[in-house]
Image (tube, rainbow, N blue to C red):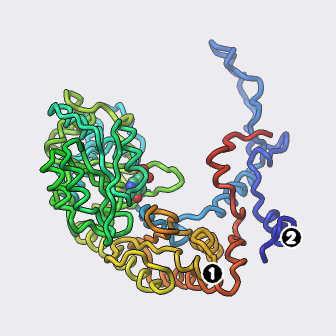
Amino acid sequence: MTGAAGGPEARARRIRDRLGLVFEESRPGRRGVDPIPLDVPPAPPEAEPEILRERVEGLPELSEPEVVRHFTRLSRLNYSIDRGLYPLGSCTMKYNPKVHEWAARLPGFARVHPYSPDALAQGCLDLLAGLESLLATITGMDAVTLQPAAGAHGELTGILLIRACLEARGDARKVILVPDSAHGTNPATASFSGYAVEEIPSDARGCVDLDALRRRAAVGDVAAMMATNPNTLGVFEEDIAEVARVLHENGAMLYMDGANMNAMIGITRPGDAGVDVMHLNLHKTFSTPHGGGGPGAGAVAVKRHLEPFLPVPRVSGAPGARRLGYDRPQAIGRVRSFYGNFGMLVRAYAYIRSLGAEGLRESGLTAILNANYVRRRLEGVLHLPYSSPSYHEVVFSDRDLEAQTGIKTLDLAKRLMDYGFHPPTVYFPLIVHGALMIEPTETESREELDAFVEAVRAIVEEARTDPDLVRSAPHTTPVRRLDETGAARKPKLRFRP
Ligand SMILES: *Cc1c(COP(=O)(O)O)cnc(C)c1O
């Protein structure tokens, strides 16, 4: 069953999957198309004959069906949200409606030149202004920039805004606080922006320890705290308004990592709780496709006092007379070429407009329901380290499983692939032993969730009866366990024949 390197299973898989690069499949002289012979004299080499090459070396030579089959075969090895549940906690991998792809490809959006005069790009500018205003309403904030290209990039933008604002007040502080449950990008952002990073512990509920925060903020050197809500344990920060009040009282600001906005949308607004600045992962909450490093959009929403510092250009003017403004003396500059990943903005806009206020709220409530359904059905099967109510995701631990069977989170995650599921997020947040962070999102049906739960239960059973089967998983994937450290430390980024 485990298919040793030379076994019949491995051989069948090797022949079936043919994982060679397109360069390795190349054979001299094969071609996809034969251009029709010219019936006019060829044009003489142009003004720069030295740039004309006799031959192009190194390009693969294949026939048309070979090219089609190569890429189709590769695409079928890939797991995607179009194939099944993608329960990566914190990543909010929801289904992306295909009609948004159609909208993003409309020629008026897809083919407009980024340097078109404002008068010829009114529709695009209108979409930017409209999306900013919708996001301000959804978050309860005053102004929005759509430029940042990802969540982490939004964090950087937000922290630079705080820095610019504090420096303009003549109060350049040097410390940013993050809870110990924070996503790794939060401390990375703070450090990258030139701040010293200090950790605030979580209490028994999994929330920010208020007493620790009060003590630390009172010192008077804190620029801001970066907090995620609901946090990475899937727990709502019940005292978020008090966190904001404590920070403000001590001259600091509250940055909210809004990557988990899926759980709050239409239900409660960060701006009403006192948040000064936050980012949204449009490519999580607002459905636009992500994963595999694809384009993202990390819109940043701010309160009035931070608006003057937002990156240029800003869209202004009424419908029909929209324009891009650059004359903003306090702006932090540009954070991205042009206006952000515009195609993602079209998809997010389409998502919000097609769902409407009621639909958005329902999506949030369904996401919470789905996470709690999974929680209920797996409680007792896996250890649940925090008993606080779950929002859009639930975090289990491998503590008991490991103690009883020796099977760890990584083994369980790998074995899930044999059952046809993408594994959940593992080993994050760091404060949970062997964390398994499951976020089903609202787009999954009860049947899909039941199948996932059945798979996890079956694996836990296997851990008791046949632990080696789990420890040596996956068995059905094109490649088995990879050297992940080697891939990060000694990456092979170039093909060498
Ligand atoms: C995804 C995520 C981020 C980073 O967003 P990217 O778009 O991947 O850069 C930050 N914080 C949390 C909590 C996240 O889930």
Q: Which percent across, then down, holds residue 263? A: 31, 68
Tell me the quarter of the picture where residue 135 sits. Answer: bottom left
Tag 2: residue type?
Answer: Gly
Question: Split into 4 quadrants, where in the image is the C terminus?
Answer: top right
Name the N-terminal-most of marks 2 and 1.
2
Classify mark 1: helix, strand or loop.
helix
**Residue sitting at the far top:** 47
Foreground pick, 468 / 12? 468
Tag 1: residue type?
Answer: Thr
Which residue is painted at 74% across and 37% down in the image? 59
Tell me the quarter of the picture where residue 455 sits. Answer: bottom right
Task: Give me the C-alpha separation between circle 2 and circle 1.
Answer: 28 Å
> Which residue is labeled 2 in the image?
7
> Which residue is labeled 1 in the image?
405
Q: Which percent across, then down, holds residue 54? A: 77, 23
> Label 1: how many residues lie within 10 Å, few (<14), some (14-19) or many (20+)?
some
Q: Is residue 177 left or right of residue 243?
A: right
Q: Nearer the viewer, mark 2 or mark 1?
A: 1
